[in-house]
Each structure stands twice: as C-alpha cells, then as structure tokens.
Amino acid sequence: MAGLVRDYRGAEIQDLREHAIFVLSRRDEEAAIDELLRIARSDSDTELRGKALFWLAQKDDPRVKKLIADLVLKERDE
C-alpha cells in the first residue's frame, strides 16, 4: 500500500495518477480510504480531487459522509 501511495504522489503523468486513484478505490484497506480522503481534500488537481470523491462516495464510511457534508457546507458558506 505504501508503494502505491508513494507512486501516486510522485507521478507526474495524469493517467498514472488517475489509475492509482482507481486502484486505491478497489482496495478495502483503511490506508486506501485515508489516501483517497487526502486526495479529495487537498490535491492540487481539481479533476483528480473529483475522481477521488467519486470513488469515495461508493464507500460506506462515516469519514466520507463527513467530508461530503463539510464540502457542501463550505460551498454554501462561500
């Protein structure tokens, strides 16, 4: 798992980063969800943040629900 996270963070090619997000989405490990949450919150690429959020929305995890609620509230307040 650590290698996949390292590869995502070090990749400069968009397709590789997208593939890493997909692979993370297929894993049921907490570390995979943690990395997807990190990407959805703070990646500099808005398209990749959206892809991470899409895959996170498929998960039944309370942290994901909180992230989505926080994003909705943030958008409403802006």
Image: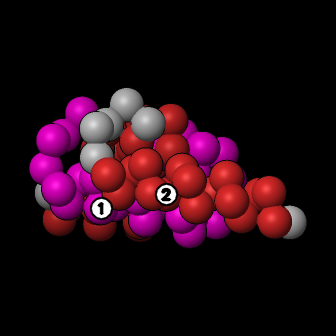
**Looking at this view, is 37 or 64 the one in front?**
64
State the image quarter where residue 71 is shown: bottom right
Residue at 30%, 61% in the rendered image: 34
Point out residue 73 in the picture as x, y percentages from the top left corner: 68, 59
Is residue 68 something one can see in this rendering? yes
Q: Eyeballing the image, is 42 above or below 51?
A: below
- Magenta-colored stretch includes residue 42: yes
**Percent of width and height locating residue 3:** 19, 61
Which portion, as a residue range, is magenta?
Answer: 26-52
Q: Which amino acid does label 2 sit on?
A: Leu
Q: Name the residue under label 2.
A: 67
10 Å crowding of disc 1: few (<14), some (14-19), many (20+): some
Q: Quadrant of the C terminus?
A: bottom right
Q: Which of 4 and 26 is in front in this view?
A: 26
Please report the residue visible at 81 percent of the width from the left and 65 percent of the height from the top. 77
* Magenta stretch, overall SS: helix
Task: Return the residue at label 1.
Answer: 34
Residue occupying image coordinates x 66% and y 45%: 47
Q: Position of residue 52 (x, y in %)?
A: 48, 45
- The amino acid on which the numbered mark 1 sits, given as a three-letter code, is Asp
